[in-house]
Image (tube, rainbow, N blue to C red):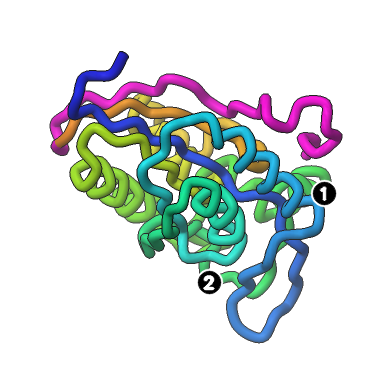
Amino acid sequence: MRESLDVELLLIRHAEPVRIEDADGRADPELSGRGRQQAERLAAWLAEETLEAVISSPMRRARETAQPVAAGKGLTVVVDEELDEFDRQENSYIPYEELKAAQDPRFHAMVTGQLEGQFQVDPATFQAGVVAAMDRIIDANPGKTVAVVCHGGVINAYTAHLAGIASLLWFETRYTSISRVVASRGPGGLRSIATLNETAHLRGTGLGES
């Protein structure tokens, strides 16, 4: 059982989005049909849990994943700009799984943490922004359980920070996976990773493969 002022963060990767290539401006894809089903399964799974806030990245794929979760609890999705993914300025969105299968240079940039060349993002700056956002969420929600719907890179960066792992992107998050962190308030408070990559809500549905 958590102490009364401890916060439980449910770090949720967005559902599957559509593929966008060479957009006019930055790519901000909506969810695919399969992704919408994943988001609905997630919301149904979380219906039995106590959730007191739902916070989302500003990107459409995260907001559309967060919306059914919030609606099921009678909550409003709160957008936090610092939960944006490291590829925020890209004009294409190719799913990580496709990049991996093709051994695309962008995949290699991700797994080696060399984001500067491919994504024009300093990894340390990106991680610091993520940590600051999570600290702010923790301080604002004493004693609450909070769903934070964001991105694989965000979840990786934060959990790597907590675990003292040098690699920024150290595990492969699944669509709508849940990773739980229990945290005491304050920047010096204890943060503990409770689970990583929960996908039981997709088991047996055919929606969990990536």
Q: Is residue 54 magenta?
A: no
Q: Where does residue 192 sit, x and y in percent of width and height? A: 33, 22
Badge 1 amino acid: Ala
Quadrant position of residue 145: top left
Whether residue 75 is visible to the viewer of this picture, yes or no, is: yes
Residue under pointer 2 = 89
Residue with the most extreme bottom position: 24
Instruction: Confirm or deny contact between disc 2 and disc 1 (CB under 8 A).
Output: no
Which numbered disc covers residue 68? none
Quadrant showing the C terminus: top right
Q: Where does residue 32 sit, x and y in percent of width and height? A: 77, 59
User: From mark 2 to mark 1, how far is it between C-alphas?
Assistant: 22 Å
Q: Where does residue 123 sit, x and y in percent of width and height? A: 41, 51
Residue under pointer 1 = 102
The 10 Å Cα crowd at callout 2, few under 14, some 14 to 19, many 20 or more, is: some
Residue at the spot 36% in from the left edge and 59% down from the top edge: 82
Start-end of magenta stretch: 186-210
Left or right: where 179 falls relative to 4:
right
